[in-house]
Amino acid sequence: MIAALMPNYNRIDIAFEHGEGAYLFDSAGRRFLDFGAGIATSSLGHGHRALTAAIADQAKRVMHVSNLYRVPGAERLAQRYVAASFADSVFFCNSGAEANEGLVKAMRKTMADAGQPERTRVICFDGAFHGRTLAMIAATGNAKYLAGFGPVVDGFDHVPFNDLQAVRDAITPATAGILIEPVQGEGGIRPASLSFLRGLRAICDEFGILLGLDEVQCGMGRTGKLFAHEWAGIEPDVMSIAKGMAGGFPMGAVLAKEDVARALVPGSHGTTFGGNPLAAAAGNAVLDVVLAPGFLDQLDDTARYLWRGLNALTARHPAVFTQARGAGLILGLKCAVPNAEAQQAAMAEGLLTVAAGDNVLRLVPPLIIGQAECDEALALLDRAARRCTPSLAQVAAK
């Protein structure tokens, strides 16, 4: 007999009752250091006083009114994003996949409005992950995610990551733009080189196409700047964000320059829940923290400290971890053992992590961690590695 919850997840048999900072506590009272953060979503950790107070206060007043009316909190949040980024205008939605759908629609509509309706195709990259809708699994291009869902949504062309010549070769008169994650998350914590991102911006300018960035996982301060592309010194035409922007409350957004934003006229795109008063309150509370003076600098210092520790860890346990990779606090350990085995060993030691593609163990902790939490995580990973280290008998058997 099927469970009441559909069986589309292989859920770990553990239930958390409450959290505090970077820690979660299960129903048996066991404490776990959370370096998964709800898959890079609990940006301020658990039980953050300002965030929970903002949500509770707004919930007491009004949670939802729809976008038939003005939402002052959303207007304020949009203005803050515009002031802090490349964007001239913002559309709020509910998830990363929805944000990416809006991004692609905006690209196509911008080209149509410019008298080039034939420009509908988007260049994407091997190893990408853009969401689970029918169009976004096509943009992702992973055969595993496409299997069983019928004809693949047309309009996406895939090329190797970090290969500028492949991008040039893929551009045709039907190309509307490029969509890339500055740091691939699900694909194995693979950063695009800064020179590659600069090259993409130059190519888009040369060919008159749009640069779209998917910063759903790597944005919102996770790399030590508000958005990952800032490290390359470039600006996209349009960008998707989600995950950490409301600290765990469902929220996504499309940020765009004026010429792209103007394409989404009334009736061309919409959402019932996006940017409602409760989401906006959460989003503003997160920005209060992330944009506070010194926060991102401290995050960058912490991330560099953790990076050094992870490199030392891989040197000590080459039979388990072969490489540290990533940027800021979106990090991964390339595994020599199955990453599921490493994930289970880490959990047994009290550390929560997330598996990623390319046999990588993903580390995406709350942005509020410090060196003490890094030291604890490194010690737990060291113990987990010892659990996974093949014995001499196992090596001989191979």
Image: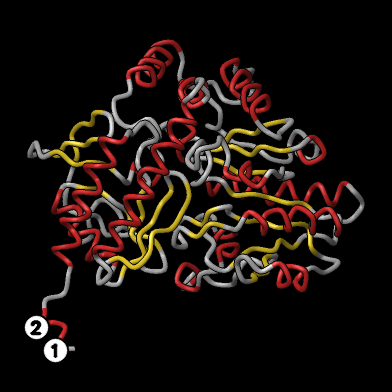
Q: Is residue 376 visible?
A: yes
Image location of residue 132, percent across then percent down:
49, 56
Q: CA distance from mark 2 to mark 1?
A: 6 Å
**Residue on which disc 1 sits:** 397
Q: Is residue 194 above or below residue 339?
A: above
Q: Is residue 279 visible?
A: no
Q: Amino acid at mark 2?
A: Ala
Q: Residue at x 73, y 37 (%)?
A: 267
Q: Residues within 10 Å of mark 1 (few under 14, many from 20)?
A: few
Q: Nearer the viewer, residue 280 or 239?
A: 239
Q: Residue at x 41, y 69 (%)?
A: 358
Labels in figure, total: 2
**Left or right placement of residue 152 versus residue 222 in this view:** right
Image location of residue 172, percent across then percent down:
82, 69
Which image quarter: residue 30? top left
**Left or right placement of residue 350 versus residue 236 in this view:** left
- Tag 2–tag 1 contact (CB < 8 Å): yes
Image location of residue 333, percent across then percent down:
35, 60
Q: Is residue 165 above or below residue 181?
A: below
Q: Quadrant of the C terminus?
A: bottom left
Q: Which mark is residue 308?
A: none
**Left or right placement of residue 230 versus residue 107 in this view:** left
Disc 2 is placed on an element classified as: helix
**Residue on which disc 2 sits:** 393
Q: Amino acid at mark 1?
A: Ala
Q: Nearer the viewer, residue 275 or 360?
A: 360
Residue ranking furthest to the bottom: 397
Image location of residue 164, percent across then percent down:
71, 67
Q: Residue at x 50, y 36 (%)?
A: 221
Disc 1 is placed on an element classified as: helix
